Amino acid sequence: MKKTLIRVTLLVATCFTLIVPQAFAGPRVVNCDDGGSLQRAIDSGAGSAKLIEIQLTGTCYENVTISRDLVSINGDGLTTIHGQVRLFGAGQIVFRDLTITGPGFGIRAANSRVRLFGVEIVGNDDSGIFATESSSVRLNSSVISGNHGLYGLQLDHSSANLVDTEVSGNESDGIGVFHNASLQAQGGSITGNNSLGIFVRMSSTANLNGTHVWGNGAYGILMDMASAGEFRDVHLNANAVHGFELSGNSVLNFTGGMIGWNGEHGGWVLDHSVLRLFDTQVHRNIGHGIVIGRDGGVIVVGNTEISNNTEYFQVVCQGKEASIEIDPSANVKPIECPDPDF
């Protein structure tokens, strides 16, 4: 009986010794400068549903594929992944304090959910981030810059939430939001992109709060094909052409903020689209403040001011079906609209 008890005790102790290190194991440490591989570290968790946490240092010259949940990759601020990161059906993926650059897309996500904290997506040969198939991307205090594809960030049937994030200096558009996609941004800036700052189309939405959209090579934002926007304290300033354009049955509510110093007009509203301005300043554009054409409509309320734009008429309606409704408390004059009321 005593021998049996000793054997059972030893067996339990042995099992506990084997189990405990795995249960309480810390992050895997990968130094790519010493020959480590991020992909091997990810693959080492195959068959397990537990969180894989990786402390990554150095420069990793490799493409990385993640097709499982619960992976956290933490850099040291100098860490670089020189290659494409691909996510397929992966959830609760986190990147922190590193740079992603190199050939192809920076991150390509399909049906995945990824969060980035202090990450720089820079200098990729294609778009910085391409999210499809109901993917969700969240960026905090991050940068998407100098990418050479059509968009710094492209959303297709997907969503993104940008917090204090910069999208700048991309070769074409800063952000593309397409096919029932949605963009949210709090703070941050979308600046210096060679074409549009933001392109929203095909029943997509953009909600911006306290974001600066300025200095882009064409429009600050173009909304088309039944898209919608809600902007609060947003600044559409100093874009090379217009601050914004609404077309194709699109709607934009603009509260607070400013539309100013753009290279042509503050904005265009056309093709059955509607702009609502609440307590907004539209001034010093090198053209008219607002141009309304082809059945477009504008509603101006509160302390909105459309004034001091270079052209004499601050608002111009192109055609009898273009219309504007101005609250008595607003300052909008002079205007050139043959039939200003709806």
Image (spheres, rainbow, N blue to C red):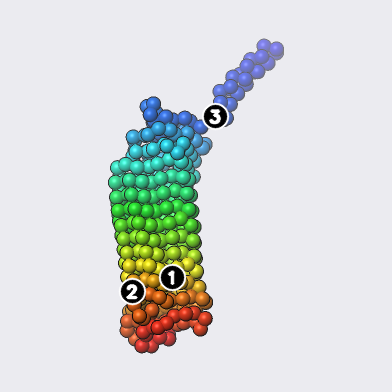
| Residue identifier under label 1 | 252
Q: Who is closer to the viewer here, 65 or 74? A: 74
Residue occupied by mark 2? 287
**Most distant residue in the bottom direction:** 339
Q: Earlier in the sequence, mark 1 or mark 2?
A: 1
Q: Residues within 10 Å of mark 2 (few under 14, many from 20)?
A: many
Pinpoint residue 205: horizontal percent, then vertical percent. Answer: 43, 64
Residue 199 shows up from this direction: no
The answer to whether the residue labelled 3 contacts the one labelled 1, judged by CB atoms less than 8 Å apart, is no
Q: Quadrant of residue 22?
A: top right
Q: Residue at coordinates 66% horizontally, 14% vertically from top-left?
A: 6
Considering only order in the chain, which callout, 2 or 3, is on the residue closer to the N terminus?
Answer: 3
In this rendering, the label closer to the viewer, 3 or 1: 1
Residue at which label 3 appears = 25
Residue flagged by tag 2: what amino acid is it?
Answer: Gly
Q: Residue at x 51, y 37 (%)?
A: 51
Q: Is residue 210 left or right of residue 110?
A: right
Q: Secondary structure at mark 1?
A: strand
Name the secondary structure under disc 3. loop
Q: From the image, which quarter does the N terminus lie in?
A: top right
Residue 326 spot, x, y in % from top left: 46, 82
Give the residue furthest to the right: 2
Q: Amino acid at mark 3?
A: Ala
Whether tag 1 and tag 2 are in contact, CB under 8 A, the answer is no
> Residue at position x 46%, y 74% from top?
277
